[in-house]
Amino acid sequence: MKRTAGLIVCVAAFLIAAKLLVEDVFGLRLDPLLRAWIADAGTGTAAIVIALLAVDVLVPIPSSLVMMLSGAAFGVPAGSLIALVGSIGGEWLGFELVRRYGRRAADRFVGGAESERFRHLIARHGAVAVAVTRALPVVMETVSVVAGLSAMRRRTFLLASLAGTAPIVVVYAWAGAMSRQTGSLVPAVIIAIAVVGFGWVLYRARFAALTRRPASSSAASRG
């Protein structure tokens, strides 16, 4: 519970600090830029959203923020669909790259130790692990990559990703639409924290023990 509370606090602190850094330190006002970007939303904007979410598995992208912007720009139904296409595309990309290029690619993306730890999770829980971890930044990308090393069928992976990702993109798109309607970032921040917090609680309740570093066994082997 302490770690969960700490994660929620960190997410909130990151969102607030990022906004303060950009606006107060660099003097760049985000609100006018976002309003202009949203007002001119069209095919190009949708393509940008999809591309940003698709490369999230390769480079650190604040995917939750991108999903919210999609909802703010296109509304809940269209914004959710656009974000879903980009998210599934990114998850599939990580899976396919590792399935094609093997352990070297997985170790490059997530590190050898992380790859080994999450292999146990995939081996035991399979598609359920893929679906449940879609709400967690970093963990989601790691599981997508490591799933490519497993015997999981491509169709199973995609269906599990779809089942886990679809509710999340709808919630984030709704958060973005709500923030646009109210003219405040508060709904988006609260919902982002709630989604990550819920995902982390669920993850810890079911899977965390399988991905902990075996510290005790390592210490025993060194002794």
Image (tube, rainbow, N blue to C red):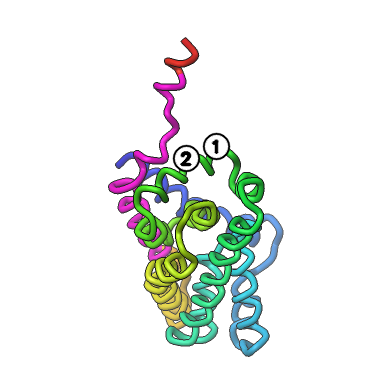
In the displayed structure, 10 sits above or below 158; it is above
Mark 1 packing: few (<14 Cα in 10 Å), some, or many (20+)?
few
Taking depth in this image into account, of 76 and 166 the one nearest to the observer is: 166
Taking depth in this image into account, of 40 and 78 the one nearest to the observer is: 78
- Which numbered marker is on residue 198? none
Quarter holding the N terminus is top left
The answer to which image quadrant residue 217 occupies is top left
Mark 2 packing: few (<14 Cα in 10 Å), some, or many (20+)?
some
Type of the residue with mark 1: Ala
Position of residue 9 in the picture relative to residue 112 (left or right): left
Disc 1 on helix, strand or loop? helix
Name the magenta segment's main secondary structure. helix
Type of the residue with mark 2: Arg
Q: Is residue 197 magenta?
A: yes
In the displayed structure, 129 sits above or below 172; it is above
- Residue 150, given in percent of the width and then of the height, sits at 49, 53
Can residue 81 be seen at all in this image of the molecule?
A: yes
- Residue 64, given in percent of the width and then of the height, sits at 50, 65
Residue depicted at x 46% and y 16%: 221
Position of residue 158 in the picture relative to residue 104 (left or right): left
Outermost residue toward the right in this view: 26
Disc 2 on helix, strand or loop? helix
Q: Look at mark 2 in the image and give the residue it sits on.
A: 117
- Residue contact between numbered discs 2 and 1, judged by CB atoms under 8 Å: yes
Residue depicted at x 46% and y 45%: 118
- Which numbered marker is on residue 113? 1
- Residue 184, given in percent of the width and then of the height, sits at 46, 73
What's drawn in magenta, residue-wise?
190-218
